[in-house]
Amino acid sequence: LVVATNCFTLASDEPRVSVTVKGDGQSCVVQDRSTTCSALPSLLAQDLAISRGAVVSVASVGCGEAAAARARSVANTLKAAGFRNVVVVGFLSEPSTNCAP
C-alpha cells in the first residue's frame, strides 16, 4: 500500500526531484548525492539549483510508521525552508513482509 500526503496536481512545468531518507533519519540522498537531512534545503536550492516551487517527493528506506515518520520529518524541514510542493510517499508494508510498527 502506497500513501501520499499533501497531494496536488503533478501536471506542472516545475521540475521534480526525489529525496530518499536513510534508515537513521539523519542521512538523505538526492540525485545520487548524500547529505545530512538538515543540510538538504541548502543542497537543493544552492548546489542543485532546485526552485522552491519544484515538486519534491520524500520517501524513507523501509516501511511502516517509523519510515513514514522519518519522511514526514524531512518534508517538514523542506516546507519550513520554503519548498511549497512537497509530497511524502511511504509504504505501510512491503510485499510479503511485515513491518515493525
Image (spheres, rainbow, N blue to C red):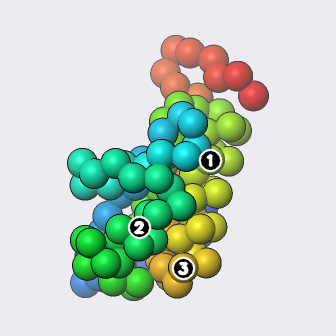
Residue 73, compared with residue 11, is above or below; it is above
Whole-number angstrom distance, CA of label 2 to CA of label 3:
13 Å
Residue at the (33%, 83%) spot, across then down? 51
Q: Earlier in the sequence, mark 2 or mark 1?
A: 2
Q: Amino acid at mark 2?
A: Val
Q: Earlier in the sequence, mark 3 or mark 1?
A: 1
Quadrant of the rendered image containing residue 19: bottom left
Tell me, yes or no, if residue 48 can be seen here.
yes
Disc 3 target residue: 81
Disc 1 target residue: 70
Number of numbered discs on residues: 3
Residue at the (53%, 71%) spot, across then down? 78
Q: Position of residue 100 (x, y in %)?
A: 70, 22
Q: Quadrant of the C terminus?
A: top right
Q: Nearer the viewer, residue 96 or 30?
A: 30
Disc 2 target residue: 56
